[in-house]
Image (cartoon, grey):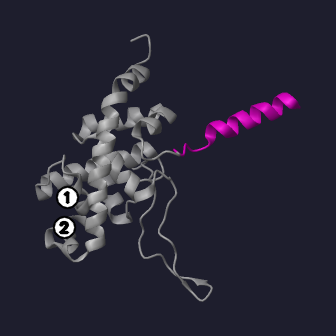
Amino acid sequence: MRIFLLITLSMLGSCATYQPTQINDVCKIFWGETDWYEDARDVKKRWGVSISVMMAIMRQESSFRPNVRPERPKFLFIPLPRKSSAYGYAQAQDPAWEDYRKATGNWSHDRDDFGDAINFIGWYVDKSHRRLGISKADPYRQYLAYHEGWGGYSRGSFTKKPQLLKVASNVRKQTARYNAQLKKCRPALDKSVRGWFF
């Protein structure tokens, strides 16, 4: 009976979703789950977007929580529909997620899966670069396009949102912090991901 209980607890523990506690330190995030680093590195190679930019956007959007949704407003005690369909690590909305799935040809993507979510961010940044001419290394403007959508960015909708401009500035600062941190821990992470026999 004790062995069965230990096996069950071990299985439940392995199924638990990783939740980083120190979200301002990208090295600690990746050391907590090296699979995340491997996913981020693969996405960087696929879309040509820096890990720091993608992680800073994800930090802003969800604080690395997999099941986040916008709060549901209430009228008295009655829950009303959510104002947005945003969900998951990347806070991707339904239409953008469907575009992404069609573009990548993989319908098994999940917004509450880190690998899928960071791939979405990489795809979106790449598309913003191609559609709007925004440098992939410009987290400030990339975040504005990410938040407002390509049409909204083209119309300059963000110019009337001073709070959003502050948030985009924070994403730029977070990108710089993550970039400086990664320079120190990337060699060890690469070695860890490759393993000792390669």
Q: Nearer the viewer, residue 100 or 139?
A: 139
Q: Nearer the viewer, residue 42 or 20?
A: 20
Q: Earlier in the sequence, mark 1 or mark 2?
A: 1
Does residue 19 show up magenta in the picture? yes
- Amino acid type at image mark 1: Arg
Q: Residue at x 87, y 30 (%)?
A: 2
Q: Residue at x 24, y 63 (%)?
A: 144
State which mark lies toward you, 1 or 2. Answer: 1
Query: Are the residues tagged 1 and 2 within 8 Å (C-beta)?
Result: yes
Tell me if residue 74 comes above or below residue 140 in the rendering.
below
Q: Residue at x 82, y 35 (%)?
A: 5
Other-residue count near label 2 (Cα within 10 Å), few / some / many at <14 / 14–19 / ≥20: many
For mark 2, what is the residue? 153
Instruction: Tell me residue 193's x, y (percent).
Output: 42, 24
Instruction: Tell me residue 138's x, y (percent).
Output: 18, 51
In whole angstroms, how far apart are the C-alphas of marks 1 and 2? 9 Å
Region of the chain picked out in magenta, as a range: 1-20
Instruction: Tell me residue 67's x, y (percent).
Output: 52, 57
In the picture, the quarter occupied by the N terminus is: top right
For mark 1, what is the residue? 141
Q: Residue at x 30, y 37 (%)?
A: 180
